[in-house]
Image (spheres, rainbow, N blue to C red):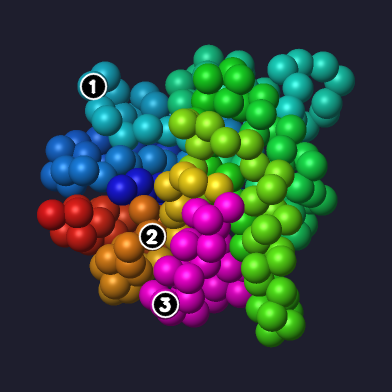
Amino acid sequence: MLIAGNWKLFKGPHEARAFAAQIRHLPERVSGVQVVVCPPFVSIEAAVRGLGQGSHVRVFSQNVHWELEGAFTGEVSAPMLIEVGATGAIVGHSERRQYFGETDETVRMRTETALEAGLSVIACVGETEAERKAEETEEVLERQVAAIPRHERLVIAYEPVWAIGTGMSATPEMAQDAHAFIKSLHPTRVLYGGSVKPDNAQVLLAQADVDGALVGGASLDALSFEAICLAAADVRA
Ligand code: PGA
């Protein structure tokens, strides 16, 4: 089971460091659960410092470029992330796809480079509300998953776009169906994302093919993030 907190555009270095210090011992209380936080680029190093030596919480970035260096203003490379202590990256989050022109092809390139550089990857897929209503969910997932390479350090996050930040999570059945479908295409661990909160985490995580969660809003508060990790540990037990 893997629980990853996606901080999005929240928590500068100061806050990241304090938060990390607060949760540094969390993995010891949630056996069988890997705990990951994904701060903004500029807060990665501060989070790593806040965790200090010996913490099992891992720090991932929210994106990574497909080239190692070059004339790519505004981008950050895998070796740079590794240098500041990140061990993985989110790739292809729906907010990147919606607002920043991310495509299946750029997701593929970013993922390949990140994996080659030694990072772990959480590759995100998920349909929009219009696509679900038009009964295109499987077609969309098929296309998005086809662009994601297979690798032991890669997990997929299924995040229906209509469930992200809306407070309206997928039902456990919807999540289970989508996860089973994704695994039929790409055998790997699949995390669920989209309005995961302390009060719905357990029932979502209890689904057979839900292997963890990618948590946005509810990961910003240490108590609520801890509660979700504890729910994951309960499901595992
Ligand atoms: P949310 O975000 O938990 O705030 O819905 C999830 C995500 O975008 O990863």
Residue type highlighted by circle 3: Glu
Which SS class for mark 3? helix
Furthest-front residue in view?
Answer: 184
Secondary structure character of the magenta stretch overall: helix
Q: Which residue is mark 2?
A: 209
- Give the residue drawn at x 16%, y 59%: 234
- Give the residue drawn at x 28%, y 59%: 228
**Residue 150 x, y percent position in the rendering:** 57, 36
Mark 1 and mark 3: span between their CA atoms?
38 Å
Q: Crowding at label 2, few (<14), some or many (≥20) Cα neighbours within 10 Å?
A: many
Which SS class for mark 1? loop
Q: Quadrant of the C terminus?
A: bottom left
Residue range corresponding to the magenta coloring: 158-185
User: Height in image: 56 above or below 135?
Assistant: above
Q: Which residue is mark 1?
A: 54
**Residue 76 x, y percent position in the rendering:** 68, 27
Q: Is 39 left or right of 4, judged from the image as shown?
A: right
Q: Which residue is mark 3?
A: 173
Mark 1 and mark 2: span between their CA atoms?
31 Å
Residue 105 quadrant: top right
Q: Of label 1 and label 3, which has the lower sequence position?
A: 1
Residue type highlighted by circle 1: Gly
Residue type highlighted by circle 2: Asp
**Residue 126 x, y percent position in the rendering:** 62, 62
Furthest-bottom residue in view?
Answer: 133
